[in-house]
Image (tube, coloured by chain):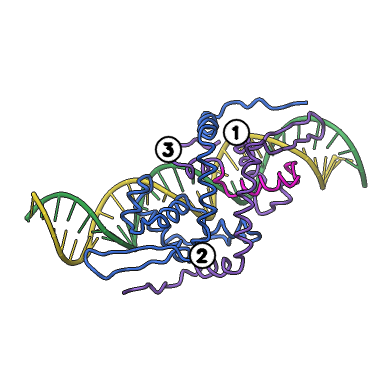
Chain colours: A blue, B purple, C yellow, D green
Amino acid sequence: MYERKTTPNLNCGLDLIGEVLYGKWKMRLLWFINEGYQRPSELQRKIPDASRRVLNIQLKELEEHELVSKRIHPVLPPKVEYSLTDFGLSLIPIIGALGQWGDKNDHKLREVITKALHHPIICENID
Amino acid sequence: MYERKTTPNLNCGLDLIGEVLYGKWKMRLLWFINEGYQRPSELQRKIPDASRRVLNIQLKELEEHELVSKRIHPVLPPKVEYSLTDFGLSLIPIIGALGQWGDKNDHKLREVITKALHHPIICENID
DNA sequence: ACAATAGGGGAAAAATTTATCCCTATGCAA
DNA sequence: TTGCATAGGGATAAATTTTTCCCCTATTGT
């Protein structure tokens, strides 16, 4: 596993939440687990853009941060189920708000994202 | 500037908001600009953990994504002021909610973050 | 002359994150 | 027997982000 070389900044609430939520797929993982997709393979099917590997890693981090708990059923083929802890559950409304904002501003967002992809020359306001 | 090699995924609201908000210091920049710290040097003083360079870069991205607008006063020494657009302003409640959650769970978060830093062996639930 | 302030950006290094590929194991179905 | 599904991890490569260092403009104050 990757060994951190710098210590994280933990000065404010945003730093703190960032430590546990900053990861490309973490919010989606929490969201889908909350929706009932609890098995790794189900989550991978819900998030096909992520590699299998990174989902495993981020699930493990979420578990270490006690946002999800993992239940391993000792059967073959293996069966694993993740579920939200109360702590993780308390984040769902916030993740919902983020997703809602994104959905509500879908059109505008696609526009500015596409524009920025071609980094146009922005016309500055000069007074 | 860094030239992207892969195209972003824009499948859902979370992808979209991630495109404009995913950056270590972006939410803090929006927050402080909203609080009235509008000049680059003020922002740098409010966020001393970030390098000057990266704040400039992320401010430029926020501007390209139309979350902030930049006003350059053609005076010497130069004076620049950022302000939130209506679009950026509409994110403030969400950023506030994130920060609040972080503050409310300050103690617990420090605990799990510190624990994970030493990656302990997690005791799995087995049934 | 020199330092400090204000704003900005190039180049390269370092840190971090994400992707790719390969390997373990077992049971079930064609 | 081969192939697929299940779950996961090591090693390594690639992509991306952030930091560090240095340079530039121009003014004010010492």
Q: Mark 3 = which residue? A: B6
Q: Is residue D24 left or right of residue B114?
A: right
Q: What is the x, y in percent for residue B82?
A: 71, 38
Q: What is the x, y in percent for residue A65?
A: 49, 65
| Up-down relation of residue A125 to residue D22 (above or below) | above
Q: Judging from the image, what secondary structure is the residue with disc 1 in?
A: helix
Q: Mark 2 = which residue? A: A87
Which residue corresponds to the image point at 52% horizontal and 54% vertical from the top-left? A22
Using the numbered discs, state the Cα–Cα distance from disc 3 to disc 1 in whole angstroms: 19 Å
Q: Quadrant of residue A76?
A: bottom left
Callouts 3 and 1 in the same chain: yes
Q: What is the x, y in percent for residue C29?
A: 11, 54
Q: Is residue B127 left or right of residue A9?
A: left
Q: Quadrant of residue B90?
A: top right
Using the numbered discs, state the Cα–Cα distance from disc 1 to disc 2 in whole angstroms: 35 Å
- Three-letter amino acid code at disc 1? Glu
Give the magenta part as a residue range.
B21-42
Q: Quadrant of residue B61?
A: top right
3 or 1: tag closer to the N-terminus: 3
- Three-letter amino acid code at disc 3? Thr
The subunit letter for the residue under badge 1 reads: B
